[in-house]
Image (cartoon, rainbow, N blue to C red):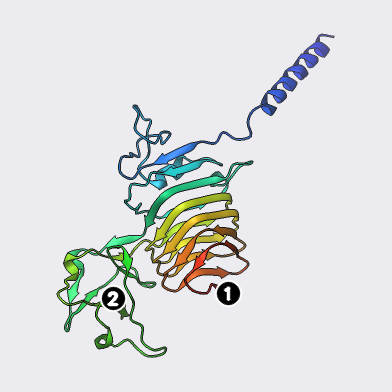
């Protein structure tokens, strides 16, 4: 009899626990703030401004991602200064949960892959030419004041002739960039930069991700690369420009919806779709026809 009573008591207690957990919310999603000027990676990111103790914004998006849980929202403070980072979202922890999407709100901020060319990075050649040799080869790009400079490309199948590069343009020759300066222009004392970091945002094996109000520019390969096994990804009011290969690359079995966005002025493709990838564009501007490969 005592055992029967104990069994009933235990069963009642378990039922109470079940009802208790059923009443809990499906997800405990939070907001993480990032400020690349006033932030500090020793803070916890739970407030947009430093309010005492460890409460305040972190400095880098990477730090915010390291804190994030499924369904969290990362909010960037836009200080009109680019975030010089390359970030990645991968797996369930950086996906949506329940009705909550994993979100990055840019508030108009820019994420840049540009690396400044130091004064001693230039080598003066003859006839107004200047040479700079990037550490990483392939998908070159050259910028002045953060804007892409026009590339001189010879006719298809013909080699580059340095003497044919017009003033204000550049060309790739034997693994180096040759720039023909304008009159009275000295590249070592101006704000030239190269596409240095490889990819602005990489996504793989994530679900229900929402990215908005962000610009990805001046990366060596892609502004955004949606690599494989990504579903429910939405890009809204996103700009990808000045990247060395593609603005947006969608691959594998990934699916993305692109709304009110701009994919323009990228060196090879503005939009590249390969394998079984799918991109649904809504009111989105392309600078050139999308590249679709099997």
In the picture shown, does residue 129 fall above or below 5? below
Q: Secondary structure at mark 1?
A: strand
Left or right of 264: which side holds 130? Answer: left
Q: Is residue 165 visible?
A: yes
Q: Is residue 205 visible?
A: no
**Where does the image place residue 233, in percent across and percent down from the top left?**
57, 54
Find residue 293 and name its label.
1
Which image quarter holds the N terminus? top right
Left or right of 160: which side holds 98? Answer: right
**Residue placed farthest to the left in the image?**
184
Check disc 1: other Cα within 10 Å, few if <14, some if 14-19, many if 20+. few
Check disc 2: other Cα within 10 Å, few if <14, some if 14-19, many if 20+. many
Quadrant of res 227: bottom right
Q: Nearer the viewer, residue 278 or 41?
A: 278
The residue drawn where x is 36% and y is 83% is 153
The residue drawn where x is 18% and y is 74% is 123
**Where does the image place residue 25, in percent across and percent down from the top left?**
63, 31
| Sequence order check, earlier mark of 1 and 2 | 2
Q: Which residue is mark 2?
A: 177
What is the spatial separation of the Cα atoms under label 1 and label 2, in whole angstroms?
A: 29 Å
Q: Are marks 1 and 2 in contact (CB under 8 Å)?
A: no
Left or right of 145: which side holds 189? Answer: left
The residue drawn where x is 35% and y is 39% is 41
**Residue placed farthest to the bottom in the image?**
158
In the picture shown, does residue 143 fall above or below 162? above
Quadrant of res 40: top left
Q: Secondary structure at mark 2?
A: strand
**Where does the image place residue 147, in percent across and percent down from the top left?**
32, 66
**Residue placed farthest to the front in the image?**
283
């Amino acid at each position: 009899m005592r055992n029967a009573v104990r069994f009933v008591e235990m069963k009642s207690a378990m039922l109470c626990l079940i009802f208790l957990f059923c009443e809990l919310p499906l997800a405990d999603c939070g907001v993480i703030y990032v400020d690349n000027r006033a932030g500090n990676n020793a803070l916890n990111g739970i407030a947009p401004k430093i309010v005492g103790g460890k409460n305040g914004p972190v400095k880098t998006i990477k730090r915010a991602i390291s804190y994030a849980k499924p369904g969290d929202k990362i909010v960037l403070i836009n200080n009109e200064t680019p975030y010089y980072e390359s970030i990645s979202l991968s797996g369930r922890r950086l996906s949506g949960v329940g009705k909550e999407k994993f979100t990055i709100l840019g508030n108009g901020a820019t994420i840049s892959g540009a690396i400044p060319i130091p004064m001693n990075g230039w080598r003066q050649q003859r006839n107004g030419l200047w040479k700079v040799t990037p550490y990483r080869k392939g998908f070159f790009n050259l910028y002045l004041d953060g804007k892409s400079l026009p590339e001189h490309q010879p006719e298809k199948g013909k080699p580059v002739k340095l003497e044919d590069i017009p003033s204000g343009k550049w060309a790739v020759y034997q693994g180096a960039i040759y720039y023909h300066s304008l009159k009275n222009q000295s590249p070592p004392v101006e704000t030239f930069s190269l596409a240095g970091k490889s990819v602005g945002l990489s996504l793989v094996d994530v679900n229900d991700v929402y990215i908005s109000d962000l610009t990805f520019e001046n990366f060596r390969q892609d502004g955004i690369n949606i690599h494989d096994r990504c579903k429910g990804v939405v890009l809204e009011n996103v700009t990808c420009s000045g990247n060395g290969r593609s603005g947006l690359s969608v691959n594998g079995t990934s699916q993305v919806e692109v709304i009110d966005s701009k994919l323009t002025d990228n060196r090879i493709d503005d939009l590249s779709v390969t394998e079984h990838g799918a991109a649904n564009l809504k009111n989105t501007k392309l600078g050139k026809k999308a590249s679709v490969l099997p």
